[in-house]
Amino acid sequence: MTYDYHEPETVAEALALLALHGEDAHLVAGATAFTLLWRQGLLRPGHVIGLRRIAALGGITSTEGGLVIGATVTHRAIERAVEVGRYCPALTRTFASVATVRVRNQATLGGNLAHADPAQDPPPMLIALGAEVVATSAAGERTIPVDELFVDVFTTSLRADEILTAVRCPALAPGTRATYLKFLPRTADDYATVSVAATLRLADDGHVADVRVALGACGPTPVRARSVEAALRGARPDARHIADAAARVDADIAPFDDVRGSATYKRDMARVWTERALTELVS
Amino acid sequence: MRADRRLIDVLRDDLGSTGTKEGCSIGVCGACSVLVDGELLSACLLPAVFADGSVVVTVEGLAQGDELSPLQVAFIREGGFQCGICTPGQLIAATALLAEHRRPSDAEIREWMMGNLCRCTGYHGITRAIKAAAA
C-alpha cells in the first residue's frame, strides 16, 4: 500500500488538492512525524500533499517588534535565525533544545504544531509568548491563539479544509523576560518529562505586571497554567509568593503515567520546574 | 518510485549503497545519518522524493578515491570505533559538524554528536578523533 504524493507550489493549489481529496488527504511539510505514523500504520491517507515547495510558507519576517514565521520553516532555521534571537533568545533556545540536529533539519514549525504531540517543546513557549497561528482555507484566513489550537493528543482545532500557514509572535512589552526549561532525566534528545515556558514582566514598583506560564508533557495537550498566573499577577515576586504560585500548577495540569514518569511524579516535577522557571525570571 | 519509500530504502536496496545503516528506524540512533545538500538528516525519516534533485553524500562519498578523509583517518588512529555499525553515521555527522565549526569545542562536539549512538566502544575515541581531525 502506498499513497499518491502531490507537491503544489502555491497555497491555492494545495487548498484545491485538499478540497478534491477531502478526508483521504494528509498534509506534510518535513514529513518527520508522518513517516513514523505511516510506517506504524497509524495513518493511511490515499493522498499526501507536501507543502515544502510553497515559497509563501517559508521565511521569517520581523514585524514592528513581533515575528511571523512561515509554517514550513525548519526548527534548525528558526534556531539559527538572527531575527528570532533578537525577538526572544528563549525562543531560539527552545527550538535548539528539540531532539537532535537531524530532526531539527527536517521537522518544521507548522508540522510540529499540527502534529499536536503534548510533549513537544515549541508549543509551551509559543503559548507563553502569546503567539497565534494563521489557518488558511478557501474562505480566507483566521487566526487561532496557540493555547486554543490543541484539543487532544494529536488533535487540533484546525478544520479539515484549513492549512496552518504561519505563526505570529506578538511584540513583547519592553522588559519582558522569557525562559523555557525542560526536565530531561533520561537523555538529552528525549522528550521532556515535564517542560515549563514562562514570560514575565515586572512593573516599576517591582510587582509582577504580567506573567504567562505554559507546560508541556503534563496532559493530553500543552497547557497554560492560568492558576499560577493568577496567583502571581500583581504580587511581589519573592521566594514565598513564587513557591505558592508554582504550587497552584497542580490545578492546571492532567499528566498521565508513561515511561517518562508517573502522573504523581510529573505533578511534583511540574511544581518544581515551574518554581525554577519563575525564580529564574525574577532573579 | 513508490511515494512511501524512504531515502534509506533507495540507498540500500536500489543503489546498493549499504554503507548507510538502518538502526532504530525512528530517527533516534543516527546510524542512517546522511548529508542532503549539506544538511545532516536521518535517511530513515526522509521520504526519498524529498531528495529529488539534491546532492546526497553517504559514507561512501567521504574518501577521494583511495584517499580517506582526514576525519576517517582520525577515527582509525584514535580508535573511534569498535564493531563499526554506527561508524558511517558518526563519520557523516562529524563531517557536518566540521563543515559548520572548523574548531568545535568539546561541548559543541558532545552537543552535536549526542544523536549518534555507539553501544560498544563509547564516545571518548570518537570525540578524540573529531578533535584530531579539526586540529
Image (spheres, coloured by chain):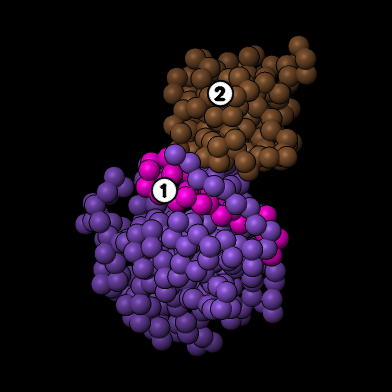
Give the residue at x 45% y 51%: A45
Q: Which residue is mark 1?
A: A44
Give the residue at x 38% y 72%: A224
The hue in which chain B appears in the rendered picture of the protein: brown
Q: Tell me the kind of residue under disc 1.
A: Arg
The hue in which chain A appears in the rendered picture of the protein: purple
Q: Do tag 1 and tag 2 residues touch (Cβ < 8 Å)?
A: no
Residue lying farthest to the front in this orientation: A20
Q: Position of residue A124 (x, y in %)?
A: 45, 65
Give the residue at x 56% y 55%: A49
Q: Nearer the viewer, residue B100 or B47?
A: B47
Q: Tell me the kind of residue under disc 2.
A: Asp
Crowdedness near tag 2: few (<14), some (14–19) or many (≥20) residues, C-alpha within 10 Å:
few
How much space separates mark 1 and mark 2, taking CA atoms?
24 Å
Q: Which residue is mark 2?
A: B13
Query: Which region of the structure is painted magenta?
Result: A30-59
B1 sits to left or right of B118: right
Q: Position of residue A228 (x, y in %)?
A: 34, 75
User: From the viewer's perspective, is residue B135 above or below residue A209?
Assistant: above
Crowdedness near tag 1: few (<14), some (14–19) or many (≥20) residues, C-alpha within 10 Å:
some
Dot 1 and dot 2 within a common chain: no
B69 sits to left or right of A88: right
Quadrant containing the N terminus of chain B in the rendered view: top right
Rendered image quadrant of residue A41: top left
Residue lying farthest to the top in this orientation: B66
Depth check, mark 1 against mark 2: the one in front is 1
Residue B52 shows which numbered tag? none
Q: Nearer the viewer, residue B48 or A47?
A: A47
